[in-house]
Image (tube, rainbow, N blue to C red):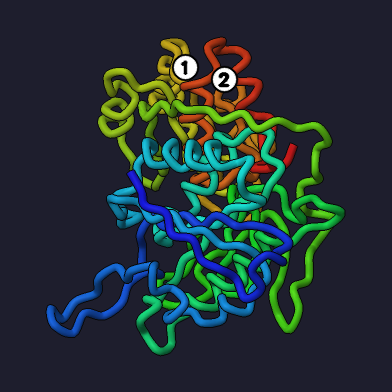
């Protein structure tokens, strides 16, 4: 399933903490193969040659390289569960975890892990790069080194950031609040509805009031199921009855994330509302999030969202689409009581939405 590489720090025997790195694939770990004129994964046995700064770190470093490296476009919920299992199996042996991951679906993975790792009391940071580590101007080294530094940071013997995060381009963000917003610039990830957790400049400045507090006596519980019978439905002017009905009648569909306009608004045409109401009556869970990156759903504020409230559409507050769809997958798989599921869906589980 994976191979393990142990890297000795600069001061063996004097390390203050230990970090487990999990390399899943993605741009960060690619180098140019001149012989075949293509990018290929580099051998992490040679990571000290590629990132010599690691020699100056004062903590132990172990790297797990998955046997089947994944382009993040091929990421699947089964991969999220595998990552959660790896963290569970190594939880007592390491103080923190860094996951090297492709950028395209990193926010989905971070969101999913924030639910799958209940009771997390250690730092889990996902990071990657816009340019391969083998390219001269790559952002891979800075992202990797600083993610390691933050992951190893402790205060009074406890993780300084005990939650699932994304580190990219000097910013540490809550994982289930982040979205990929850029494909050609280094500041790939943004968090419009929640402040950054830390900023790395000359020193690393932690935004302590917004970091999830350590829960004394917390025990890690790892869930191993996600229900993929879900769909995202973005609204657009001109969407017609045939499209809506074809989606709402997908066999075995359990949950739907409705991407509505603005503060949660949607068409008020009777055919549209009747289709949603009938689907909810059949047991479909509909979770309403905004198409806007900033702001939140406030169902009932405008006439165009009052009917959604009345027929049983659930408000996603300021949840991102990534956090919403993975939350639906998680609860549909792990919460058997439908009414309890609905209550938990509109309640923050791991800081993914405002109450």
Q: Quadrant of residue 271?
A: top left
Rounded to the nearest angstrom, the CA distance separating label 1 from label 2 is: 7 Å
Q: Position of residue 282 (x, y in %)?
A: 41, 11
Q: Quadrant of the N terminus?
A: top left
Q: Image point 65% across, 60% down: which residue?
A: 151
Dot 2 surroundings within 10 Å: few (below 14), some, or many (20 or more)? Answer: some
- Residue plotted at (55% across, 55% down): 20
Q: Position of residue 159 (x, y in %)?
A: 75, 52
Return the x and y of residue 261 as percentages of the image width and height. 52, 46
**Residue 297 appears in view:** no
Residue tagged by mark 2? 312
Relative side of 30 to 103, left or right? left
Q: Is residue 295 above or below residue 255?
A: below
Q: Which residue is mark 1?
A: 280
**Quadrant (top left, top right, bottom left, bottom right) of the C terminus:** top right
Cβ–Cβ under 8 Å for marks 1 and 2: yes
């Amino acid at each position: 399933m994976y191979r393990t590489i142990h890297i000795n720090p600069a001061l063996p025997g004097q390390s203050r903490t230990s970090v487990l790195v999990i390399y899943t694939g993605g741009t960060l770990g690619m180098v140019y193969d001149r012989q075949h004129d293509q990018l290929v994964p580099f051998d992490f046995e040679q990571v000290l040659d590629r990132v010599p700064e690691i020699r100056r770190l004062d903590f132990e470093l172990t790297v797990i390289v998955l046997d089947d490296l994944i382009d993040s476009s091929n990421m699947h919920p089964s991969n999220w569960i595998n990552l959660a299992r790896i963290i569970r199996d190594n939880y007592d042996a390491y103080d923190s975890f860094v996951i090297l991951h492709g950028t395209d679906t990193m926010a989905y993975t971070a969101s999913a892990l924030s639910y799958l790792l209940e009771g997390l009391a250690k730092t889990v940071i996902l990071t990657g790069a816009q340019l391969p580590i083998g390219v001269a101007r790559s952002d891979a080294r800075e992202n990797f080194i600083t993610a390691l530094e933050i992951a190893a940071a402790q205060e009074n013997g406890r993780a300084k950031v005990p939650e699932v995060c994304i580190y990219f381009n000097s910013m540490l963000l809550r994982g289930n609040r982040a979205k990929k917003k850029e494909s050609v610039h280094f500041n790939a990830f943004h968090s419009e509805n929640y402040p950054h957790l830390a900023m790395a400049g000359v020193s690393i400045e932690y935004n302590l009031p917004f970091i999830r507090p350590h829960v004394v006596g917390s025990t890690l519980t790892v869930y191993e199921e996600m229900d993929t019978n879900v769909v995202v439905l973005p609204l657009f002017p001109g969407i017609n009855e045939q499209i809506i009905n074809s989606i709402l009648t997908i066999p075995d569909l359990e949950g739907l994330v409705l991407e509505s306009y603005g503060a949660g608004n949607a068409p008020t045409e009777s055919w549209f509302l009747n289709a949603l109401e009938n689907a909810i009556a059949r047991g479909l869970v509909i979770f309403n999030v905004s198409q806007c990156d900033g702001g939140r759903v406030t169902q009932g504020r405008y006439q165009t969202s009052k009917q959604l409230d009345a027929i049983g559409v659930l408000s996603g507050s300021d949840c991102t689409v990534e956090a919403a769809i993975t939350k639906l997958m998680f609860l549909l798989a792990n919460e058997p009581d439908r009414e309890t599921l609905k209550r938990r869906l509109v309640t923050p589980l791991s800081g993914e939405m405002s109450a």
